[in-house]
Every structure is written in structure tokens, then in C-alpha cells.
Image: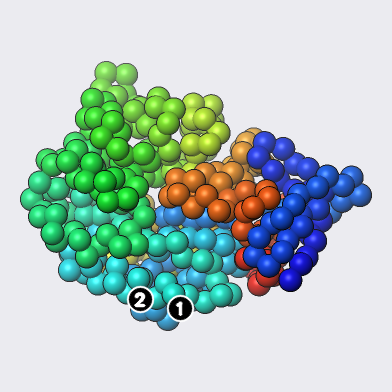
Amino acid sequence: MTEIVGGRIIVDDRILAGRIHIEDETIVGVEPDEAEAAGPLLAAGFVDVHVHGWGGYDAMGTSAELDGMARALLRRGVTSFLPTAVTASLPDLAAFSGRVREWLPTAPRDGAQPLGFNIEGPFMSPARRGAHDPAWIRQPAAVDRASLEPLLDGLRLMTVAPETPGAVGLIRWLRGRGVTVSAGHSAAGLDDAQTGYAAGASSTTHLFNAMSGIDHHTPGLAVAALTADDVYVELIADGHHVHPALWPIITRTKPADRLLLVSDALALAGTGVLHGVIGSLEVAVDADRCTLRSTGALAGSLIALDSAVRNLVRSGVALPFAVAAASRNPATLIGAGDRGRLATGQRADIVELSEDLAVQRVMRGGQWLAAGS
């Protein structure tokens, strides 16, 4: 099948009036055409590499829940994603991994495409656990590698606190097994954080949240992440996890290809339900903010990547930069180089946006599949 899609195409660092030529699932050409200057905005499909649920569906649930999550995310412009586990026992994480692996070949064609999965714990600092159950936190040095083998097939991303005993060895082992490592949930000082990145950690789990930060006497993980040009950083751009006044520090510090927008969304997102659980911990929703009922700590977000892109643009960030942070950059991080850009040879994953950046239509693999809601 062939199709031509015209509009204002968001390509790399600019917006191009033109047409995208598609054959089957692939973009075979992008050509300028000023006649399309009044057309819709066209962005590459968003890639959410850190999302725990959406629309009432939990990433750690059944295959039916994963189906629902994939379909709900697609309606928000997310064409690819990593179902993300919270900290749990190793047997429960192995069961999660097995469920996702079994589900991957049967994932719905009318939903976001899963590219594997993400495990956010259990190798974190108890002092920086955020909304994770402290009962299941483990030190890398205390966990036999054999117990991690059931997690590896399909594991694309894992969070490790670099200062914890055995973390450097675990980071190296995971990288050797093809897993991308993200430093986070960490109380690391600058030296330990830099050592973790040198050992192979290449990303940073929700920058500023649940980590040592910027202090003029004792700089921590956030400083190491911001000052290393080759390191990726995740941003939850909901206005709660990181105050918007700090966003310019991130966007002016990090190279344009190293910022990742992630949702860190919970199953409660998009439902209007005010109470639920994340893992074994109870959470409550107040307006657009979700917190642990026990401590009041933030517990994931209620946004999707389309909201994150809008929020970043409203803060003054150029649209191509914001879109790349939601598409090209996360795809590149996990080695999914066949998507994330509107360019020849890429998958035909396209989000059509209105003037106010609301999702109008979503194309996955050459087929229009959903309208925004």
C-alpha cells in the first residue's frame, strides 16, 4: 500500500512544509512542498520508555491489561513504549518479565507497539526510594546474577543507584548483556555518580526526582548527569515533579539529543479515579497530582507524552526540540533506530497535531489507527 501525507513536517531542528511518501510500513521519501504550508503539524510517533500504566490498565497486570494500556497510549500519540515495572520481589519481577515476553508477539495492532520492557527497581537507595516499596529494595552485591537471568530477555532499560554496594559491577554486567542502564533513585555523591556513568550507565531516571541534586558543597547525581554531555536525562514535564523554572537549566545544559520526555504515568492516568495502588502502596489523586497516602510523596504522573510536549513548548522550548525529546531521543537510547524521525527509511509512525498541539490522528506502521481524545 502507498500513501502520501502532507502538512508541516517536524524534521530534526525545523518544520518543513511538504509531503511524506509511505509504502506499507515505511517512509520512502520526504519532499518539500510549499502548498502544504497550511496543513497539519506532523510529528514522529512518541516513544515512552518509562510508563507504568494508563487508562486504568497496569503494566504489571495481565495480557488483557497490557492490551488496554497499549491502546490507551496510542490515542495520546504514543506509538512505541516500554511497559515499566515498579520495585517488587525478584520472583514477581521474573513473572512480570515472562508475562510481557509472552504478550509481545500478540500485542494489538491498534495499540502502541511494545519494544520490550523497563524495570525501575529493586537496586535503589532506600533513602531515595520515592514511591517504591522498601520491603523489596536490594543491594546489587547481595543478589546472585543467576537470579537476574529470568529478567534479561526483552529487558531494555533498568534503573540502578550507582553508589550502592556492587552497583558498578552490576552496571557493567547489564551493559554486557545488552541492557541500557539508567542511574536513579540514588543518594550518590558526584564521584560515585560519575563512576556509575563511566561503568556504562547512559541515562538518568526522572532527573531531580528521588536523587541527590545540586548543592554548592555536595553536588550529587543531578550535577553529574547535567554536566556529562553524553548522558541522557529523563524529564517528567507535568509541572509537579520538576518546577518549570528548572526546565531551562536542563534544556540549556543538555545537548538537544540527550533530553528524554517520559510520562512515568500510572494506571490511574486518564481515568478520573482518585484512589489506587502502585505496586503494594496506596496512592491518592488531587487534581492532576498523585501522591502516596502514607507519606505524601509524589507517586508517578497522570500525563502522557502529548501533554509533556505541550508543556515543554509552552515553557518556551522550540517544538522540534520538544518532539525529538519524545520520539527520536528515547528511540535512540534503547537502540530502536528504525523510528523516532520523519525521514526516509524510518517506520511510518506519525502523529498529526492541531495548532494547540492536541493529537488529532495517529498512524502506526503506515495505518491511521486512532484519533486523539
Closest to the observer, 44 or 164 = 44
Tell me where residue 178 appears, x and y as whole percent. Answer: 32, 50
Q: Which mark is residue 106?
A: 1
Q: CB of mark 2 within 8 Å of CB of mark 1?
A: yes
> Callout 1: 10 Å neighbours few (<14), some, many (20+)?
few
Hey, which quadrant is residue 61 in on the image?
Answer: bottom left
Left or right? Give the position of 39 relative to 27: right
Q: CA distance from mark 2 to mark 1?
A: 8 Å
Tell me where residue 357 appears, x and y as whole percent. Answer: 69, 52
Tell me where residue 283 appears, x and y as whole percent. Answer: 34, 63
Residue lying at 69% horizontally and 43% vertically, measured from the top left? 11
Q: Which mark is residue 45?
A: none
Q: Is residue 246 above or below residue 291?
A: above
Tell me where residue 260 appears, x and y as whole percent. Answer: 49, 44
Question: Which amino acid lies under the numbered mark 1 shown in the image of this protein?
Answer: Thr
Residue lying at 71% horizontally and 46% vertically, measured from the top left? 10
Residue 95 in sight in this render: yes
> Callout 2: 10 Å neighbours few (<14), some, many (20+)?
few
Q: Quadrant of the C terminus?
A: bottom right
Question: Which amino acid lies under the numbered mark 2 shown in the image of this protein?
Answer: Glu
Closest to the observer, 245 or 218 = 218
Where disc 2 sits, the SS reads helix
Residue lying at 52% horizontally and 49% vertically, measured from the top left? 337
Q: Which mark is residue 102?
A: 2
